[in-house]
Image (cartoon, helix red, strand yellow):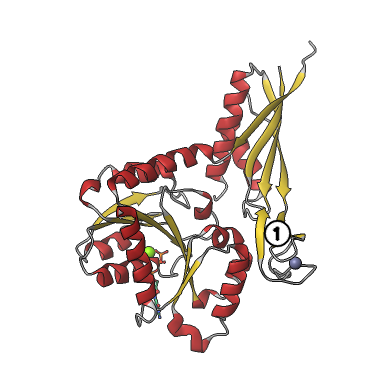
Amino acid sequence: MHELSVTSSIFEIVEKHAVNNHAKRVVAVNLEIGALSDLKNEWIQRYFDLLSAGTIAQGARLMITRVPAVFRCNQCQQLFEITSFITEELVCRQCPSEDVVMISGKEYHIKDMEAEI
Amino acid sequence: MNREIKLINIKEEILSENKGLADKIRERFEKKKVFYLNIMGSPGSGKTSLIMKTIEALGGRYRMAVIEADIDSLVDSEKVAALGVSTVQIHTGGFCHVDANMVEKAIESLPIDELDLVILENVGNLVCPAESDTGAFKNVAILSVPEGDDKPLKYPLMFSLADVLVINKLDYLHMSDFSTQRVMKRVKALNGGIHFFPLSCETSDGLAPWISWLEHEISSIRA
Ligand SMILES: Nc1nc2c(ncn2[C@@H]2O[C@H](COP(=O)(O)OP(=O)(O)OP(=O)(O)O)[C@@H](O)[C@H]2O)c(=O)[nH]1
Ligand SMILES: [Mg+2]
Ligand SMILES: [Zn+2]
């Protein structure tokens, strides 16, 4: 359910670019989604399949790259990645300050797509 | 026939259309000098209770309206309307959050020229309201003590995007291992600029700092 609105935006953008480029068929779409998003890849694809049925985007594979949650330490500028908020402490791996800021992990971006022309 | 496969550059933000609409809504509220607040949190965390306490505490000093979003019921809007505040109901039709489009339709029936404050009660959900800009000036997340202090670990996006975290149901603290300090430390690391208001809608403890933050925001939009 949570994936539906994001997926319909993806579909609209894909369809727009397919039409603008006179594509015959969209083969694959490359997406970059931040690690903090709770949306599930599998459901994004399922909703996309539903929305795209009968359109030029039918059958397109969504290739989702998860952008890692990266933090920067404000004390020593060290960058570090958090792969699990549940098991890892949000402290600098080097100094170890707790004064850290998030610099990536919240993205919702469509990079490009492969289409038959 | 041989078909050519071509790579088409897109480079677009997936949520840009909603964001554009939300920006327009914000502009409109800004022009009218009406402060507009979005409240998010799990089902039962205390969104409606906080709104009702806030209406009481503001005691008619501001002209306000409440937008209630519910998957499919009128319960919350009836409660709020009983306090004499105008309410608009958004039926999200099973949708799990409010988007800018729904807000735009809802505010058509609001007398914006005659208001100082609009509060939106988003759908009870920690996953996706955070992703969808509603056009509000500030986003409030509510976390209540019985939900557990691990929620910021499980739903980091919501807590990383909110401007304010209300920690509600403090009256339950003594019967749980919930640590307000732990929550604040975690959330602060995700989101340095966030304001915390630990309070209880039941006892009204801690309500005053929340109300003065809100009044400050209302007056800065008017200035
Ligand atoms: N003990 C205690 N109970 C509270 C407090 N705040 C709210 N409640 C109770 O918690 C229940 C849920 O509160 P609501 O305000 O309806 O929660 P909500 O977030 O609006 O819930 P939904 O709209 O269903 O998502 C109600 O029974 C409230 O009376 C509090 O600070 N302490
Ligand atoms: Mg409610
Ligand atoms: Zn450091």
> Can residue A55 be seen here?
no
Residue at numbered disc 1: A71
Residue drawn at x 54%, y 38% as measured from the top left: A8
Across and down, in percent, residue B109 comes to 25, 45
Residue located 43% across and 69% down the image: B44
- B63 or B127, which lies in front? B63
Q: Is residue B117 visible?
A: yes
Q: Quadrant of the C terminus of chain B?
A: bottom left
Q: Ligand 1 shows up in which quadrant of the image? A: bottom left
Depth order, front residue of B66/B218: B218
What chain letter is assigned to the residue under label 1?
A: A
Residue at image location 59% in from the left, 20% down from the top: A19
Is residue B53 rendered to the left or right of residue A71?
A: left
In the displayed structure, does residue B219 sit left or right of residue A34? left
Crowding at mark 1 (Cα within 10 Å: few <14, some 14-19, many 20+): many
| Total numbered circles | 1
- Which residue ends up furthest to the top in the rendered image? B1
Q: Position of residue B184 (x, y in %)?
A: 56, 73
Q: Is B3 left, or right, of B19 in this rendering? A: right
**Residue B121: x and y, percent?**
38, 58
